[in-house]
Image: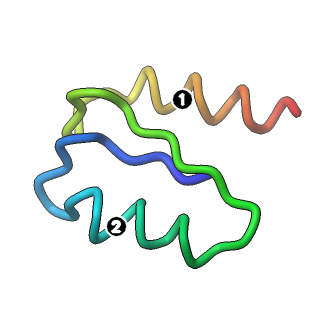
Amino acid sequence: MIIQGERDAFVPLEDGGSRVARAVVSSSLVTIPGALLTHFEQWNELMLEFLAR
């Protein structure tokens, strides 16, 4: 699972998460709407859900 903030100022979505998701077979890209670097609670929730599978 690849998680990226929709408005990441350091690595734009198209240059980061989208590119990695296309390169890694069987990956999934999850974007956090409106997020920059400040939505750690949502990131933690997504990661815990992923790990529980």
Inter-mark Cα distance, 1 to 2: 19 Å
The image's colouring method is rainbow
Residue 33, given in percent of the width and then of the height, sits at 30, 27
Residue, x 53% and y 49% (percent of image)?
29
**Image quadrant where residue 31 sits:** top left
Report the front residue among 11 and 29. 29
Q: Residue furthest bottom?
A: 23
Q: Is residue 34 shown above or below 7? A: above
Report the front residue among 21 and 9. 21
Residue hosting label 2:
16
Residue, x 37% and y 31% (percent of image)?
32
Q: Label 2: few (<14), some or many (≥20) within 10 Å?
A: some
Residue 44's tag is 1
First in residue order: circle 1 vs circle 2: 2
Residue, x 57% and y 78% (percent of image)?
23
Residue, x 28% and y 56% (percent of image)?
13
**Helix, strand, or loop for circle 2?**
loop
Residue 18, given in percent of the width and then of the height, sits at 41, 62
Is residue 17 left or right of 5 when viewed as pictured? right
**Image quadrant where residue 25 sits:** bottom right
Q: Are marks 1 and 2 in contact (CB under 8 Å)?
A: no
Q: Residue furthest front?
A: 22
Report the front residue among 22 and 53. 22
Q: In the image, what residue type sits under mark 1?
A: Asn
Q: Residue furthest right?
A: 53
Residue 21, given in percent of the width and then of the height, sits at 54, 64
Report the front residue among 24 and 38. 24
Which quadrant, please, contains the C terminus?
A: top right
